[in-house]
Image (spheres, grey):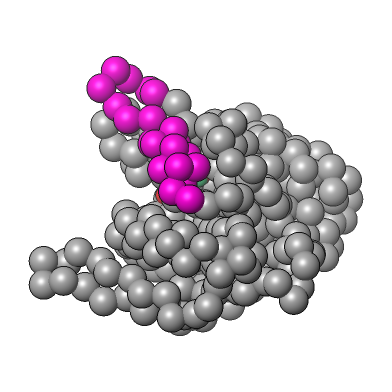
């Protein structure tokens, strides 16, 4: 992408006003005609609200005739429901992919989607970046280290971490009740972990339930140390409190969702996505 012709816009550069009923009304003051616009628009917090904003912002941009719009959405919400578990549900990944693909965005950059199958629903090019290989620069892996996937959905991710660190992979089993997306009704560990340093690898810390349950189970089973490496620091509800109470030695997240230290469990380490994003944009 030619540097001179590029305009990088962050969400805070867009003038957003609202009508009294809450409808959003964006205004783009910048001259972007014939420019390659890189729009960095986090869809968190309030993913539904932010998504609507983004659709109108892109429409406003389009009407100023840019050459191209690349949207940078570091944390892509609505991709966790990537299959129908029971009749009557929405396939939200398909809906969000359709909305973004038809919004006027020409291409998109995102990080560590829950399941890479989500990308197949997009009809625009999506550059999918992963911070999982960064794990090697954050964690020292010794002979007793294992990478742990807290559920079957994170196996691919945890395997990349295990391969990067040259350590064995342990996969836990997790069950959720069909009618409550956030609840966990079953967590099982079938491997020997006595004396191990367990690195739990996950895409999202949302309620914190997955990580807290996995850490507790690993400790009970004799793990000496528990480290958490998760990409998206969603931290909904009391996730911070839950993780602070859990027996975890280190929590490492990234800034795909910008978080103040006070929003995260004490001592949380933050890995920046900046250099990876800059490389991708160049
Ligand atoms: C699968 O369910 C995901 O990979 C994460 O494990 C999950 O979204 C984390 O959510 P929570 O923190 O609410 O358990």
Q: How many marks?
A: 0
Q: Position of residue 8 (x, y in %)?
A: 61, 74
Q: Position of residue 160 (x, y in %)?
A: 77, 43
Residue occupying the point 52% across, 62% down: 65
In the displayed structure, 78 sits above or below 136; it is: above
Quadrant the C terminus occupies: bottom right
Viewer-nearest residue: 175 or 15:
15
Quadrant the N terminus occupies: bottom right
Residue 198 visible (yes or no): no
Q: Position of residue 208 (x, y in %)?
A: 44, 55
What span is colored magenta in the figure?
84-104
Residue occupying the point 55% across, 72% down: 32
Left or right: where 235 falls relative to 157: left
Single out the residue that lies furthest toward the left.
Answer: 21
In the displayed structure, 201 sits above or below 152; it is: below
In the displayed structure, 53 sits above or below 156; it is: below
Quadrant of the image occupied by residue 179: top left
Q: Position of residue 222 (x, y in %)?
A: 65, 47
Residue occupying the point 64% across, 43% down: 125
Left or right: where 191 falls relative to 29: right
Single out the residue that lies furthest toward the top.
Answer: 87
Q: Is residue 100 magenta?
A: yes
Residue 179 visible (yes or no): yes
Residue occupying the point 57% across, 59% down: 69
In the displayed structure, 31 sits above or below 40; it is: below
Left or right: where 123 falls relative to 19: right
Q: Is residue 102 magenta?
A: yes
């Amino acid at each position: 992408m030619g540097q001179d012709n590029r305009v990088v816009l962050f969400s805070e550069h867009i003038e957003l006003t609202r009508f009294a009923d809450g409808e959003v009304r964006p205004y783009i003051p910048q001259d972007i005609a014939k420019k390659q616009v890189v729009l960095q628009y986090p869809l968190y917090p309030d993913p539904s609200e932010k998504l609507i904003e983004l659709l109108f912002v892109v429409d406003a941009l389009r009407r100023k005739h840019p050459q191209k719009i690349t949207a940078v959405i570091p944390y892509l919400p609505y991709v966790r429901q990537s299959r129908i578990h029971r009749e009557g549900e929405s396939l939200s990944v398909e809906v969000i992919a359709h909305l973004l693909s038809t919004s006027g965005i020409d291409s998109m950059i995102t990080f560590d989607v829950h399941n890479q199958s989500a990308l197949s629903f997009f009809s625009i090019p999506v550059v999918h970046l992963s911070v999982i290989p960064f794990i090697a620069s954050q964690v020292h892996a010794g002979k007793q280290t294992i990478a742990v996937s807290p559920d079957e959905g994170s196996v691919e991710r945890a395997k990349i971490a295990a391969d990067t660190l040259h350590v064995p992979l342990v996969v836990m089993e997790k069950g959720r009740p069909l009618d409550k997306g956030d609840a966990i009704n079953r967590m099982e560990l079938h491997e020997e972990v006595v004396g191990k340093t367990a690195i739990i690898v996950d895409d999202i810390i949302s309620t914190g339930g997955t990580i807290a349950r996995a850490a507790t189970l690993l400790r009970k089973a004799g793990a000496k140390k528990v480290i958490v490496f998760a990409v998206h620091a969603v931290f909904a509800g009391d996730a911070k409190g839950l993780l602070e109470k859990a027996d975890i030695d280190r929590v490492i997240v990234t800034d795909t969702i910008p978080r103040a230290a006070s929003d995260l469990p004490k001592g949380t380490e933050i890995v920046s996505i900046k250099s990876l994003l800059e490389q991708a944009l160049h």
